[in-house]
Image (spheres, helix red, strand yellow):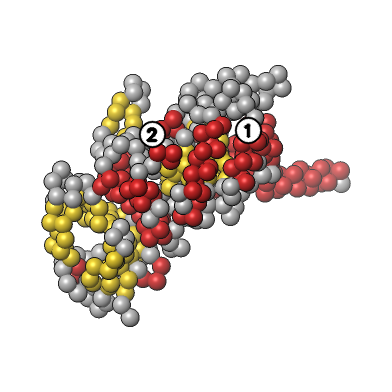
Amino acid sequence: MKLKRLLAILLMISISVTAGAQKFEDLAQTPPMGWNSWNTFETDIDEQLVRNIADKFVELGLKDAGYEYIVLDDGWMSRERDSNGNLVADPKKFPNGMKALVDYVHSQGLKFGLYNCAGGNTCAGYPGSRGHQYQDARLYASWGVDFLKYDWCDTGNLNARESYVTMRDALYEAGKPVLFSICEWGTYQPWEWAGDVGHMWRITGDIINCWDCEVGHGSWASFGIWKVIELRNKEKIRQAAGPGHWNDYDMMEVGNGMTDAEDRSHFAMWNILNSPLMMGNDLREVSKETLKTLTNKEVIAVNKDPLAIPAFRFNNENNVEIWAKPLKNEKWAITFVNRNDTPVDIDFDWRRHQLSDDLSQRSLQVENTTYQLRDLFKHEEVGDTSKNLQTSIGVHDVLMLKLTPKS
């Protein structure tokens, strides 16, 4: 009897541990939106910057457009943990401590995120979470942190999936709901295993503010917008995305030195691919055109569509990329992106192209349905599918359409 009782207790413990091993549900039901400090500021961050960014979220209408997370990337902590092994916010950069800063962001109706790393050190050489996962998770909970970006530097022979599961479990045990952002650069195919581990996962290395370049850094490289898009396009990652689990194409470079046309194309593609929308520019010095792009609610609505199916590349004619995304109520979103270095004229015959999607089992029924066309950047109706689409697209610019069946 004693043996049976012991086995029963062990079974209950096993069930309890298994049941507790989960991420926080009901977060990131649509792709997360926010701002991250890295693309513009790297480790040159401080308390006043964060306060200013939070103020700009409200002042510029970004909060109203759906952006809610302010995430401090690498470099927020001191170089050493304290005598109890806790992380310490750099006292020069954050003289009032992290809890006060989190409270300020929350007071603006926004959410706050931090960065750390699965290895012994972060990518910039600050203390990582290896061996301190549960301790760090409790600290983040005590501060009220809502988002954790978890990187993959200085990891040695660690197993990626198990490392992220450990941090997931630590966050869950700490009790404060945290959106968990996995950042192992797509090296270990996170789209195959991360759905029940994190809420979003990077699919490539770091982005850089160029149209179609690759910049080497010795053992790794940064990728321009189209390099990021193309890197995983031949792999089956679309089916991995959905409410609570998203393919992350990295923080956006909108407003960071590319042309306005390139910014529009960049923003259109991140939305149609259902990527999280994390701004990476200096919001204190944002141009009117950049703000107009970032707050385009019609484009953002494509990203938030309840059907939650990412776009696929339908065609590439004369270096004009055509991407299509099925939307709810038999609607579609379609982008035409001009990758040429000269403007192009478009004469697109809807009836000649059989547009269908194996994943959603949806097709564009132009033979028996006429679709109204709406230009999502110009905010105007531009005809329907009963006639050819005839227009011009500028250098590296985009035409983003929503197709709605006419009743």
Q: Nearer the viewer, mark 1 or mark 2?
A: 1
Q: Which mark is residue 400?
A: none
Q: Is residue 157 above or below residue 175?
A: above
Q: Position of residue 387 (x, y in %)?
A: 17, 72
**Residue receiving disc 1:** 98
Q: Nearer the viewer, residue 216 or 253?
A: 253
Residue at 25% in and 53% down: 398
Q: Residues within 10 Å of mark 1 (few under 14, many from 20)?
A: many
Circle 2 residue: 206
Q: Position of residue 115 (x, y in %)?
A: 54, 33
Residue 170 spot, x, y in % from top left: 65, 38
Question: Is residue 131 something that shows in the picture?
Answer: no
> As rendered, which of 379 and 6 lies closer to the eye?
379
Vertically, is 247 above or below 93?
below
Q: Amino acid at mark 2?
A: Asp
Circle 2 crowding by C-alpha within 10 Å: few under 14, some 14–19, many from 20: some
